[in-house]
Amino acid sequence: MDIARGQERFERMSEQALRTFWGYVGCEIERIGEREVVVSLDVKEHHLNLIGILHGGVHATLLDSAMGLVAMLARPDVDVVTSNLNLHFTAPAGLGPVIAAAEIAHLSGRMITTQGRLTRADGSLCALATASFRVIDRKGT
């Protein structure tokens, strides 16, 4: 991957993301690298479900977002879309910070496979995920 090109695209996307679902949820980028992205969220009451734990949709949002970012950075000249997301909930998270770390598991011509972990600030595991992203050209194919 061309790191400079990926970084430029990432900066443009970061500005745009603030006006999208990403910004609404409150996700923050902690670290980006060639094959890893780390995203955080300070879990507030509105992120919880009715039994007081982090809503499963927020888990999915954080992990899909982190894995999507690492996939986008791996292929900065094309668009990628999630084609499959597998999520395994392992332990509840409540209020406070959570971290989603994602990395590239496999790259091929038209597919990118990623894996991610959602942890509490103390490092305890809340969820594991894998995702596949389809590489599409700017024309949508």
Image (cartoon, grey):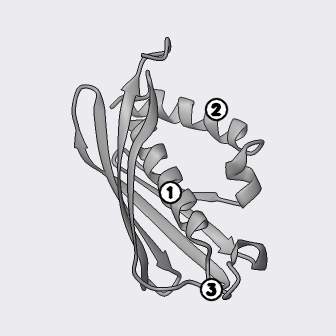
Q: Which of marks 2 and 1 is nearer the N terminus?
A: 2
Q: Nearer the viewer, mark 3 or mark 1?
A: 3
Quadrant in the rendering for residue 28: bottom right
Residue picked out by circle 3: 94
Which quadrant would the N terminus be assigned to in this image? top left
Identify the residue at horizontal 55%, vertical 30% (top origin).
8
In the image, 23: left or right of 106? Answer: right
Kind of residue indicated by mark 3: Gly
x and y percent of residue 25 in the render?
71, 59
Q: Residue 125 carries which label?
A: none
Kind of residue indicated by mark 2: Arg
Per the model, the C-alpha gap separating discs 3 and 2 is 32 Å
Q: Residue 12 carries which label?
A: 2
Q: Which mark is residue 31?
A: 1
Q: Which of 63 and 3 is in front in this view?
A: 63
Identify the residue at horizontal 62%, vertical 86% (top origin).
94
In the image, 125: left or right of 97? Answer: left
